[in-house]
């Protein structure tokens, strides 16, 4: 436990703008701590009373913590950095638990790049001295990092500064690090392939099947990669933390998954459960899918919000299909005009390359598509009605799943959905150069925006979805045999 004197001193040595959170060990204990802040006098009272064993720093809103958990994590960081220098890691605010190869480095992120940062936890596949798998973690909104001189729960010793924040304030995150946090590196992360359309049939039971497939026993073979022996293993406690459920609810999911055919059986050995899961082909046959639909590589920590992810993946799939169809139409038009499509650049503009407004703007028109327009360029989108039909949902539910007010607020009873990342939406702006010199009051009446010395016409929001869509091979003979 921290002594009163060291607690007081630690508060004085921390920047005044930092938002702190009392913790026990490594975990915050206040209900809804991500939604509410606590002042420093209250933090000190929690420490003096012995309720808290330390203080954590709430991340996001400009502060990004890079947790390097072991030597293999440091090697992975160097690999991901490529030719970029890691000199900023030696200059910025940093601290350590004292364990070999463990440290955290703190960076400041400019507000214009906040929307690009995504929480990531990348497991290296190598166990540390405590038997746990080492990892590289990029901590952002919804997470915290325990600060010195809090007591580490495993070592019983205080965290210590490598670079004190008052002498070495957080360095601005370099562009390559922001790009690294923006793009999920699925080849390193703990991921699982999720066929989104299976969710409509199996609902929450599908989480057990995906968890068993990810933690296939063959994963612990010398090669370290799962080969699909058909037996997964996990503890109820571990599954409950990943799925954000109590152990009783996890056990109930196991029972229901066995009834539905997702798993053949499950057996308990001590704290471990061995899950004998059904093959991909048989699961598709049980669901009666004529088309498998989109499959995406998702992180294992996202399993608790599978219903929302299924809608996102279907939306992204629809966008890609719309892009393909739009391009085919463009090619046919060029051929009809006697032109070579291979020599003429496409006029289709993808959402990432559209000019978008960096500040909130009113949406003047609403429609069933994610993006649409009739200007001198063409762009594409996905229909919410099509997504609703493929997901077995209503259009209003699809709209809710893609709405941040629904995604970011916990459910009123069980306080779930706390780990859902915000969806990136931008407002499309069409430049209107012919309106040079237009009076400001007339432009405002027409709902136009005056930015960068030009008038712009706002279009509906564009959804930027970043799932890595993958393909999967199926043995058709096994599906056909099951359907006979």
Image (cartoon, rainbow, N blue to C red):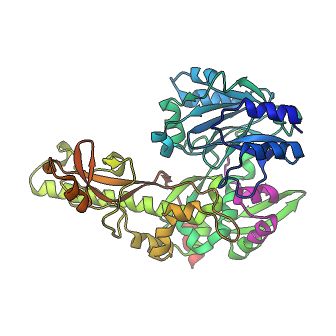
Between 237 and 255, the one nearer to me in the picture: 237
Above-or-below relation of 188 to 392: above
Inspect this view and state whether residue 438 appears: yes
Q: How far across and how far down the image is residue 315, in percent? A: 44, 62
Above-or-below relation of 473 to 166: below
Q: Quadrant of the N terminus?
A: top right
Residue sitting at x 72%, y 60%: 244
Q: How far across and how far down the image is residue 420, in percent? A: 59, 57
Residue 210 is left or right of residue 118, and the answer is: right
Magenta segment includes 230: yes
Choose top left, top right, bottom left or bottom right for residue 119. top right
Number of numbered discs = 0
Magenta segment includes 286: no
Choose top left, top right, bottom left or bottom right for residue 209. bottom right
Residue range in magenta is 226-254
Choose top left, top right, bottom left or bottom right for residue 421. bottom right
Above-or-below relation of 445 to 107: below
From this viewpoint, which residue is outermost toward the left?
338
Q: How far across and how far down the image is residue 145, in percent? A: 71, 40
Between 471 and 54, the one nearer to me in the picture: 54
Residue sitting at x 83%, y 45%: 45
Residue 391 is left or right of residue 243, and the answer is: left
Inspect this view and state whether residue 25 appears: no
Residue 390 is left or right of residue 8, and the answer is: left
Q: How far across and how far down the image is residue 484, in percent? A: 57, 79
Between 76 and 146, the one nearer to me in the picture: 146
């Amino acid at each position: 436990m921290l002594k009163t004197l060291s607690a007081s001193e630690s508060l004085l040595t921390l920047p005044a703008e930092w938002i702190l959170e009392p913790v026990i060990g490594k975990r915050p204990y206040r209900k809804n701590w991500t939604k509410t802040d606590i002042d420093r006098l209250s933090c000190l009272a929690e420490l003096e009373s012995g309720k808290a064993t330390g203080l954590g720093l709430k991340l996001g809103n400009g502060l990004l913590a890079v947790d390097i958990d072991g030597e293999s994590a440091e090697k992975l960081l160097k690999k991901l950095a490529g030719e970029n220098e890691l000199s900023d890691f030696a200059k910025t605010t940093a601290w350590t638990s004292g364990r070999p190869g463990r440290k955290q480095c703190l960076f400041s992120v400019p507000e214009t790049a906040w929307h690009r940062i995504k929480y990531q936890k990348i497991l290296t596949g190598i166990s540390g001295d405590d038997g746990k798998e080492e990892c590289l973690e990029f901590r952002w909104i919804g997470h915290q990092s325990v600060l010195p001189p809090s007591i580490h729960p495993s070592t019983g010793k205080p965290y210590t500064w490598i670079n004190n924040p008052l002498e070495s304030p957080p360095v601005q995150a370099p562009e390559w690090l922001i790009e690294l946090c923006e793009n999920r590196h699925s080849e390193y992360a703990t991921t699982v392939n999720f066929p989104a359309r299976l969710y409509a049939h199996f609902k929450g039971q599908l989480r057990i099947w995906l968890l068993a497939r990810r933690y296939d026993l063959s994963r612990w073979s010398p090669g370290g990669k799962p080969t699909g022996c058909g037996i997964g293993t996990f503890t109820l406690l571990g599954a409950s933390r990943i799925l954000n459920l109590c152990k009783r609810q996890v056990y109930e999911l196991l029972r229901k998954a066995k009834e539905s055919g997702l798993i053949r059986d499950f057996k308990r050995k001590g704290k471990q459960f061995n899950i004998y899961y059904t093959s991909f082909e048989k699961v598709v046959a049980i669901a009666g899918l004529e088309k498998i639909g989109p499959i995406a590589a998702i992180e294992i920590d996202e399993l608790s919000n599978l219903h929302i992810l299924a809608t996102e993946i279907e939306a992204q799939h629809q966008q890609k299909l719309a892009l393909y169809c739009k391009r085919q139409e463009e090619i046919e038009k060029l051929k009809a005009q006697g032109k070579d499509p291979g020599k003429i650049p496409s006029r289709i503009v993808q959402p990432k390359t559209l000019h978008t407004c960096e500040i909130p703007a009113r949406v003047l028109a609403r429609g069933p598509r994610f993006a649409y327009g009739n200007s001198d360029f063409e762009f594409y989108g996905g229909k919410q009605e099509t997504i609703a039909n493929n997901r077995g949902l209503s259009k209003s539910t699809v709209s809710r799943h893609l709405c941040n007010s629904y995604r970011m607020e916990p459910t009123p009873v069980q306080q779930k959905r706390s780990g859902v990342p915000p969806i990136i939406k931008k407002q499309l702006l069409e430049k209107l150069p012919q309106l040079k010199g237009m009076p400001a009051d007339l432009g405002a009446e027409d709902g136009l925006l005056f930015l960068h010395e030009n008038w712009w016409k706002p279009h509906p929001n564009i959804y930027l979805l970043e799932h890595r869509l993958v393909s999967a091979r199926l043995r058709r003979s096994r599906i056909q045999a099951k359907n006979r």
